Image (tube, rainbow, N blue to C red):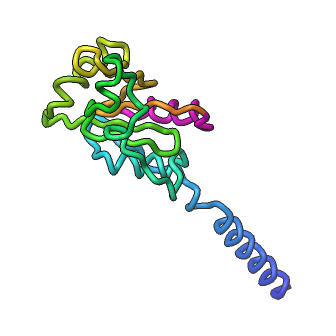
Amino acid sequence: MFLKKVLLAASGLALALSLGACGGAGDKAPEPVNPASCTYEEMVDYLTESGFIAEDAEPIDMLTTEGYVTDNTGGQLPTAPFADKAEDFDGLWLMWWDPAPSEAYENCFVNLAANNGVVVYQGGAAILETDAVNGNFAIAFGDGYAQQDEALEAFQALSAE
């Protein structure tokens, strides 16, 4: 009888340990960030931990790389410093404005809501449509980004209080 109880206890412990190793604490959701007060790096970490940015993603600077803004000048503004930081993480485009305020904040961010989420640079010389604005951040997606709906939902669900 005693041996039977010991075997049952040992098998229960083994089951609990194997369940914990297969997805217990390691699979919990990342701690949400506040988009009105978190740093750019904290938002990148949150989106990476959430699985929307790959661990090995090589970000592309959207402020100095052609093809992100729509140039309405006939080629004079193929790039534009429309944000304080903006990077493309394999199709997830993350933009941030420093509320300090910065020149990009005063010239582009403060009018995002009035422009229905469109970044307007130099009165429309260059524009960029975003998919959502939350706190000091905006998000948009390149063609073919597979998790667009899920990333957008998670980004919009963050509280900017």
Q: Residue at x 29, y 15 (%)?
A: 124
The foreground one among 20 and 97 is 97
Tell me the quadrant of the picture where the C terminus can be found: top left
Question: In the image, 120: left or right of 26?
Answer: left
Question: In the image, 104: left or right of 35?
Answer: left
The foreground one among 82 and 115 is 82
Q: Where is 78 relative to 3, above or below?
A: above
Q: Position of residue 35 (x, y in %)?
A: 33, 37
The reply to whether residue 58 is visible in this rendering is yes
The reply to whether residue 34 is visible in this rendering is no
Tell me the quadrant of the picture where the N terminus can be found: bottom right
Q: Residue at x 33, y 51 (%)?
A: 41
The foreground one among 73 and 147 is 73
Q: Position of residue 150 (x, y in %)?
A: 57, 34
Q: Residue at x 32, y 13 (%)?
A: 115
The foreground one among 122 and 45 is 122
Instruction: Give the extent of the magenta segment.
Output: 144-161
Q: Position of residue 128 (x, y in %)?
A: 38, 23
Question: In the image, 17: left or right of 96?
Answer: right
